[in-house]
Amino acid sequence: MVGRPTGEPSIADSGFIGADRHTHWRTADGARVLCPPSRSAHRTWPRALRRWLAGHRQIIESGNDKLLVTFRLDRERPHALDGFHARLAAKVTLHN
């Protein structure tokens, strides 16, 4: 349900750190994941790059909050994915 790989990296937070994970995702799914290295790593990111990622993560978290709170997706308990898609489409249509 996520579509085809685009070749563009997905932005993630530090919960997705790990070279083994990234290699597995790239070979199995064609997914590239961009997340900051741990602060104790030998090669850390410059401050400007960490701030850039934090700014983009804030946008993502705002979108997640909109989906969960405004559309009440945290309360949905669908029995089938088709029904969930229909209810989500109706909510987005009414919201617009």
Image: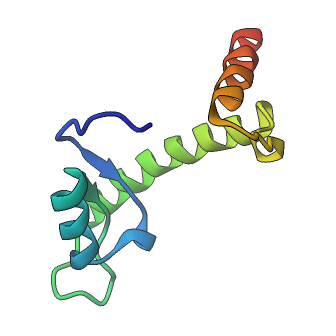
Spot the residue most to the front. 80
The image quarter containing residue 78 is: top right
The correct choice, above or below, for 6 with respect to 95 in the image is: below
Q: Quick check: 24 above or below 48?
A: below
Tell me what residue is drawn at x 33 percent, y 83 percent.
39
Residue situated in front as seen by the camera: 96 or 44: 96
Picture quarter with the C terminus: top right
Work out whether residue 27 or residue 45 is closer to the camera in this orientation and state it. Answer: 27
Position of 16 compared to 89: left or right? left
In the displayed structure image, the side of residue 38 where residue 54 appears, left or right: right
Q: Nearer the viewer, residue 15 or 43?
A: 15
Judging depth in this view, the residue of 65 and 21 nearest the camera is: 21
Q: Residue at x 29, y 78 (%)?
A: 18
Image vertical order of residue 51 relative to residue 38, above or below: above
Q: Quadrant of the N terminus?
A: top left
> How far across and how far down the image is residue 35, in percent?
32, 63
Residue at horizontal 32%, vertical 49%? 10
